[in-house]
Amino acid sequence: MFGKYADFIVSSYAATAIVVLLLIGWVVLDYRKQKARLRDLEAGGAVRRSGRSATDH
């Protein structure tokens, strides 16, 4: 299908997919961490300027 470059093309796509999935995972974990920090701050009495709580979407 890709000729003599098939190994390179497939491994490049696989590496790119792995990096993208790792970045998505990192963003999701950081989002959860930041939401938890906001909840902790609000529980301690901190107020957000926007007037929304950390659990609002």
Image (cartoon, rainbow, N blue to C red):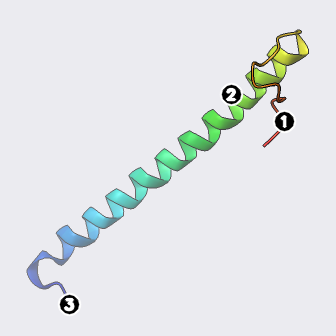
**Measured Cα–Cα span from mark 2 to mark 3:** 46 Å
Which residue is found at the position 47% from the left and 45% from the top?
23
Mark 1 secondary-structure assignment: loop
State the CA–CA distance, disc 2 to disc 1: 11 Å
Q: Which residue is mark 3?
A: 1
Residue count near mark 2 (Cα–Cα under 10 Å), binned few <14, some 14–19, many ≥20: few
Q: Residue 55 shows which numbered tag?
A: 1
Mark 1–mark 3 Cα distance, whole angstroms, equals 50 Å
* Quadrant the N terminus occupies: bottom left
Circles 2 and 3, Cβ within 8 Å, touching? The answer is no
Q: Answer with left or right where residue 10 lies relative to residue 44.
A: left
In percent of width and height, residue 13 lies at 31, 66
Q: Is residue 44 above or below residue 33?
A: above
Residue 24 percent coordinates (x, y)? 53, 49
25 versus 14 height, above or below: above
Q: For the residue labelled by badge 2, is the local secondary structure a helix, a strand or a loop?
A: helix
**Going by the picture, which residue comes out furthest to the front?**
50
Q: Amino acid at mark 3?
A: Met
Residue 54 in the image: state x and y as whole percent.
80, 30
Residue bearing the label numbered 2:
34
Dividing the picture into quarters, in which one does residue 45 lie? top right
In this picture, is 47 found above or below 19? above
> Who comes first in sequence, dot 2 or dot 3?
3
